[in-house]
Amino acid sequence: MIGPIEAIQSFVITRWRSRAGQSRGGFERWQNRAVRTWLKKRLPKVGFYKIADGQLSDLPVNDKATLMAHFDQFNTHGLTADAAWEVLKSGGQHGDLTVGASTGTSGNRGLFVVSEREKHRWLGAIVAKTMADLMWKPQRVAIILPQDTGLYGNANRLSFIKLRTFSVLEPPQDWRADLEQFDPTVIVAPPKMLRYFAQHNYAIRPVRVFSAAETLDRVDEWIANAFFDHPIRQIYMATEGLLAVSCAHGTLHLAEDSVAFEYESLGDGLVSPLITSFRRDTQIMARYRMNDVLRLSDTPCPCGSPLQPVAEIVGRMDDVFVFDGAVQITPDVMRNAVLDADRMITDFRLIQMSNDRVVLRLPPSVTSQTAQKACHAVQALLERFRTSAQVVLEQIDLPLQTNQKLRRVERRVSKDG
């Protein structure tokens, strides 16, 4: 009974701590106490940290490279990275532990390990943030993601949820009939798949749709919104845990009821977060540097939640275009240059190949005039930033790629290239 009880407790805590009308100051005082307690109780149980009682700011900042190099020193079971990979090959279960991994978008896969108690804790939190108002009626939930991390399976133990997973790595036409027969009321899928369902007129009419696993570009959002006739909400989740979920007003709120966020400024109102997951007990994540670029919002959300609103998940640090070792252009700026050039553009790829070459790829359906407008817009942007890079235009098919995450703006050159 530990699992279901843990899920219920997590549901209640999540709903209560993010309730409307709570002051931001009151929430921060609660969070600070929770973090201090976690630091005192959990840090001594792993080998990486040398202090047992101190401030969060006393801890070193770490990242994926550090975690993977010292994996056994970050988890309470002393599980090495090599051992974890072997567990993953054999199904991902190691006694009470579940081992999972990221898809490796940047070519460097990350590992995570959680206990059964934590899996139920995570389940209670995500249900509280996504489906609390739907619990009066049984729901059919379709999870359509690159891989089954083992986190969702326990949902079928809840009386009001029937859950099925569908793999993005398999051709969608192979499981279209199963998905349509399942007739989900709730869908969680990458935006490229939501767009694909719309373009191929899938016979599904969920009451709630969540974008996950990739950046939600406005062109995909427009198409999916029109097809599903519901605003597309977002789930911002990574190997590092559940990081943010959209509320009923469509505002993305950071999951500060379980994660403490610090921010490294990137300029122009952009930040990269450091996260401390103070409700995780098995794999300790403290002051962990994410590879993401966010734009926070200063506007209070009408929902009244004290949780920090996010204006935009801009993209990945890996995909910030860098020229001459100094000039940086973030993915949102590059993306907007293409999309604002002409409303007829609904898909593209923009790739930095070298310090002096950027490739713009557009589908053949785009007229030559529109393609040239977009090319000129990107070239003008590069010149405003005083780079010598030239834009090369290619008009080629842009098929659905199920074996990797969609990155419309991508940097394929090393930092010193």
Image (cartoon, helix red, strand yellow):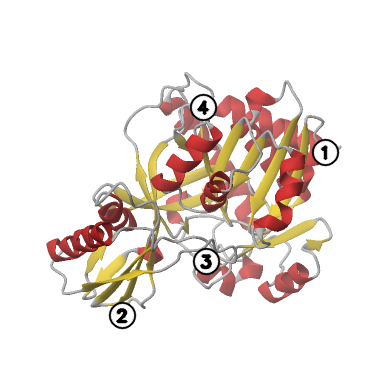
Of label 1 and label 2, which has the lower sequence position?
1
Observer-nearest of 312 and 203:
203
Write the residue at 38% across / 44% down. 312
Is 371 situated above or below 180? below
In the picture, the disc for residue 157 is: 1
Instruction: Find disc 3 in the rendering and name its residue.
Output: 105
User: Pointers 4 and 3 in contact (CB under 8 A)?
Assistant: no
The span from disc 4 to disc 1 (Cα, nearest Å) is 26 Å
Q: Residues within 10 Å of mark 1 (few under 14, many from 20)?
A: few
Instruction: Find disc 2 in the rendering and name its residue.
Output: 416
Q: Judge whether residue 336 can be spotted in this image.
A: yes
Secondary structure under the numbered disc 3 in the rendered image: loop
Q: Where residue 150 appears, x then y in whole percent?
A: 74, 54
User: Pointers 1 and 3 in contact (CB under 8 A)?
Assistant: no
Quarter of the rendering occupied by the N terminus:
top right
Observer-nearest of 121 and 198:
198
Residue that protrudes farthest toward the bottom in the picture: 417
Of label 2 and label 3, which has the lower sequence position?
3
Q: Where residue 86 appears, x then y in whole percent?
A: 75, 74
In the picture, the disc for residue 248 is: 4
User: Pointers 4 and 1 in contact (CB under 8 A)?
Assistant: no
Secondary structure under the numbered disc 1 in the rendered image: helix
Tell me the kind of residue under disc 4. Answer: Ala
